[in-house]
């Protein structure tokens, strides 16, 4: 891959990233009143985090079972309204002990 094409790819990534951030701000002037759209936008960060985290939880250990066990423990801990740090700590300890 040439140096020229790398620069083009980086510039294209910058344009696309900024476009998806600036375009909604430029097109939507007032507050969003639609209940469905507000609900959808509320859950987008959580879904994105889950999609990025789940595959790595399962693949971080030699077999998928410790990761799945840690995932279930994290869901149970979150169900009891523990904070992010305690849930992450519980998941790490359980995955470590299950290996």
Image (cartoon, rainbow, N blue to C red):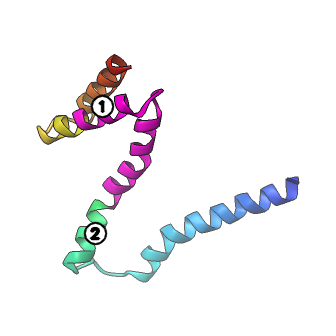
Name the residue tied to disc 2: 40
Neighbour tally class for label 1: few under 14, some 14-19, many 20 plus, Cα within 10 Å: many
Magenta stretch encompasses residue 11: no
The residue that appears at 45% across and 39% down in the rendered structure is 56
Crowd class of label 2 (few under 14; some 14 to 19; many from 20; radius 10 Å)? few
Q: Which quarter of the figure has residue 13?
A: bottom right
Q: Choose the circle earlier in sequence order: 1 or 2.
A: 2
Horizontal arrangement in the rendering, residue 76 relative to residue 2 (left or right)? left
Q: Nearer the viewer, mark 1 or mark 2?
A: 1
Seen from the viewer's position, the closer of residues 75 and 41 is 75
Q: Position of residue 9 (x, y in %)?
A: 73, 60
Whole-percent x and y of residue 5?
82, 60
Q: Nearer the viewer, residue 22 or 44?
A: 44
Tag 1 residue: 70
| In the foreground, 77 or 43 | 77
90 lies left or right of 63: left
Residue 39, picture quadrant: bottom left
Q: Position of residue 15 (x, y in %)?
A: 64, 67
53 on left or right of 71: right
**Which range is magenta?**
44-73
In depth, the one of 13 and 23 nearer the eye is 13
Rendered residue at 24%/28% (across/down): 86
- Per the image, is 50 magenta? yes
Q: Secondary structure at mark 1?
A: helix
How far apart marks 1 and 2 lie (CA) works out to 28 Å
Q: State the mark number for residue 52.
A: none
Give the answer, above or below, for where 66 lies relative to 2: above
Q: Which of the 4 image quarters holds residue 68?
A: top left
Instruction: Report x, y in % for residue 78.
Output: 19, 39
Image height check: is 27 above or below 55?
below
Residue depicted at x 78% and y 62%: 8
Q: Main secondary structure of the magenta part?
A: helix
């Amino acid at each position: 891959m040439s140096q020229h094409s790398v620069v083009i790819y980086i510039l294209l990534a910058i344009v696309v990233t900024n476009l998806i951030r600036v375009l909604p701000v430029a097109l939507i002037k007032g507050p969003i009143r639609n209940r469905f759209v507000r609900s959808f936008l509320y859950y987008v960060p959580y879904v994105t985090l889950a999609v990025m985290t789940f595959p790595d939880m399962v693949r971080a250990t030699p077999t998928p079972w410790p990761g799945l066990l840690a995932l279930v423990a994290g869901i149970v801990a979150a169900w009891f309204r523990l904070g992010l740090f305690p849930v992450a700590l519980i998941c790490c300890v359980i995955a470590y002990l299950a290996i």
